[in-house]
Image: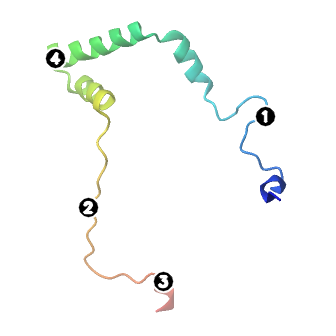
Amino acid sequence: MDKRKQNGGHSTKAKGIDKRKNPYKDVVKEVMTTEKLGLVLNMLYNKAIDKEDTNAAKLLLEYSLGKPKETKDISITEIQPLFPDEL
């Protein structure tokens, strides 16, 4: 017998309106066409090149190439106890 059927009714499926869905994305999908997106990208490109706008260039590169992964340099200079109250 499959015991997953008696999981207490905790289903991950949305019933009715999916509350996890962002309603603003639907509006953007209706308004933004591929032609309009191309115009926006051309505008950013021209602004980055012609006016040497580094913010426009950064935004264009982040969306076209993807943001670089953030790296953190962790260096330990001394050993710290995990639970200092026990010492």
Reading the image, the residue beneath label 4 is 49
Q: Residues within 10 Å of mark 3 (few under 14, many from 20)?
A: few
The numbered dot on residue 83 is: 3
The numbered dot on residue 73 is: 2
Q: Is residue 29 above or below residue 54?
A: above
Which amino acid, by three-letter code, is at mark 1? Answer: Lys
The Cα atoms of the two marked residues, 1 and 4, are separated by 49 Å
Residue 77's spot in the image, x, y percent? 25, 77
Q: Of residues 4 and 42, which is closer to you in this image?
A: 4
Reading the image, the residue beneath label 1 is 15
The Cα atoms of the two marked residues, 3 and 4, are separated by 55 Å
Extreme residue in the front direction: 1
* Rendered residue at 28%/24% (across/down): 60
- For label 1, the SS is loop
Q: Residues within 10 Å of mark 1 (few under 14, many from 20)?
A: few
Which amino acid, by three-letter code, is at mark 2? Answer: Asp
Residue 64's spot in the image, x, y percent? 30, 27
The Cα atoms of the two marked residues, 1 and 2, are separated by 45 Å
- For label 3, the SS is loop
Q: Residues within 10 Å of mark 4 (few under 14, many from 20)?
A: few
Which circle's residue, 2 or 3, is located before the other in the chain? 2
* Rendered residue at 34%/11% (across/down): 38
Question: Closer to the observer: label 1 or label 2?
Answer: 1
Which circle's residue, 1 or 2, is located before the other in the chain? 1
The Cα atoms of the two marked residues, 3 and 1, are separated by 46 Å
Which amino acid, by three-letter code, is at mark 3? Answer: Phe
Question: Closer to the observer: label 3 or label 4?
Answer: 4
Which amino acid, by three-letter code, is at mark 4? Answer: Ile
Which circle's residue, 3 or 1, is located before the other in the chain? 1
